[in-house]
């Protein structure tokens, strides 16, 4: 029965970086209906050298070109494999993907450097199929202060971006923003907003996570929080986590904000040697390094990649969520916010 429930459910992930053809095959194997695919971040964590990564982390020029080039690469993969992949321009495309046995890909960016401070770039990306924008990637940019900035919020340009995204029909993602900016976006936006990957600070004090007050604020405006699957984000300072740790996050967020705020934002990405070398400075504490020069980011046991999502569906029911609640967590909450934000 649980296998059939998983098979018939609309399953939508709010945050994923895996963009190659074989990743889409794995997505179908896992029974995932659609995902928000992050085309690029506000730096190049997969740069060939640390020097190149450091340069991109601090620079603001050239991002429009980088964005369009990478977007073209992903669009080519999608368009040459239309028997498997359907690009999502509106919520109905997700339903069609489910009905036809395809996987839906909603294109987004994790960080707004791609706009280069120009509102017109938002319209260009929209015309190219982009329907999502995470305003920062843990870096202060032209739009907003990041999660590491406790003093500042949105810039004046950032407020224009929020309004323009509402007008165009795009999902505003508040992940990695400063708390001041999160409050401003939720107040300013005429539509519900997404926190694409994170969790509750009550269970893990990671900078990307939200405290209970923020979860309530997000929920009260119809927003959605996609829960991360990385061990250290769902359980404080954890190197290894089990499915019960993820369930604890889901239950806490439900108890604070209600079932309609809960979604899935696993944040699968290419955790290769380049990424580890370039982003080490994020992890200079005992979460990963323990005084060494190496760390190993881990995901919940049994959910190490997108092909294993059936395990999550089974676990939701076995951990006391009703079938209706499980459907909302798996995809209905995401489908609702996608419809409210991008449909016209």
Image (spheres, helix red, strand yellow):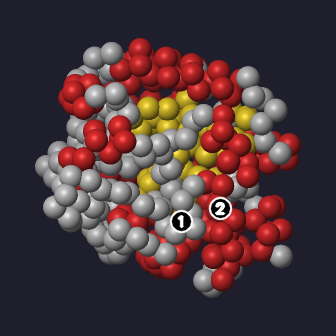
Packing grade of label 1 (10 A; few <14, some 14-19, many >=20) is many
Q: Residue at x 31, y 22 (%)?
A: 117
Viewer-proximal residue among 57 and 344: 57
Residue 336 appears anywhere in the view? no
In the picture shown, does residue 58 fall above or below 304? above
Q: Residue at x 76, y 61 (%)?
A: 9
Extreme-left residue of the structure:
151
Q: Position of residue 168 (x, y in %)?
A: 54, 29
Q: Quadrant of the N terminus?
A: bottom right
Q: Residue at x 41, y 38 (%)?
A: 110
Q: Residue at x 44, y 22 (%)?
A: 67
Image-based side of 1 in relation to 300, left or right: right
Image-based side of 159 in relation to 229, left or right: left
**Gap in angstroms between the C-alphas marked 1 and 2:** 16 Å
Q: Which residue is mark 1?
A: 262
Q: Quadrant of residue 72?
A: top right
Total numbered labels placed on residues in the image? 2
Q: Position of residue 156 (x, y in %)?
A: 25, 31
Q: Position of residue 257 (x, y in %)?
A: 46, 71
Give the mark, 1 or 2, whose residue is nearer the N terminus.
1
Extreme-right residue of the structure:
100
Q: Which residue is mark 2?
A: 309
């Amino acid at each position: 029965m649980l296998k059939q429930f998983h098979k018939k459910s609309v399953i939508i992930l709010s945050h994923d970086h895996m963009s190659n053809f074989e990743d889409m095959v794995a997505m179908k194997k896992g029974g995932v209906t659609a995902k928000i695919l992050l085309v690029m971040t506000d730096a190049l964590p997969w740069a060939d050298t640390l020097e190149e990564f450091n340069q991109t982390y601090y620079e603001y020029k050239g991002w429009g070109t980088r964005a369009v080039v990478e977007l073209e690469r992903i669009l080519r993969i999608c368009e040459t494999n239309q028997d498997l992949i359907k690009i999502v321009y509106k919520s109905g495309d997700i339903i069609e993907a489910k009905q036809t046995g395809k996987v839906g890909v909603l294109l987004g960016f994790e960080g707004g450097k791609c706009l280069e401070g120009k509102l017109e770039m938002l319209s260009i990306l929209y015309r190219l199929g982009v329907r999502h924008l995470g305003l920062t990637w843990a870096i202060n940019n032209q739009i907003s202060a990041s999660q590491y900035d406790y003093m500042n919020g949105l810039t004046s340009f950032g407020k224009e971006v929020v309004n323009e995204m509402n007008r165009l029909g795009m999902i505003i993602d508040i992940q990695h923003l400063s708390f001041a900016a999160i409050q401003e976006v939720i107040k300013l936006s005429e539509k519900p907003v997404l926190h694409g990957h994170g969790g509750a600070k009550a269970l893990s004090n990671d900078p990307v996570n939200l405290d209970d007050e923020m979860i309530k604020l997000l929920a009260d405006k119809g927003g959605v929080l996609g829960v991360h699957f990385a061990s250290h984000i769902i359980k404080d300072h954890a190197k290894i986590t089990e499915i019960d740790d993820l369930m604890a996050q889901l239950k806490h967020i439900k108890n604070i904000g209600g079932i309609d705020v809960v979604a899935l934002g696993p944040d699968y990405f290419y955790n290769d040697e380049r990424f580890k070398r370039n982003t080490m400075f994020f992890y200079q504490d005992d979460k990963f390094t323990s005084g060494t020069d190496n760390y190993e980011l881990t995901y919940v046991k049994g959910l190490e990649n997108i092909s294993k999502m059936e395990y999550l569906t089974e676990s939701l029911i076995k951990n006391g969520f009703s079938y209706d609640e499980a459907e909302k967590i798996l995809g209905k909450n995401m489908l609702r916010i996608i419809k409210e934000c991008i449909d016209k």
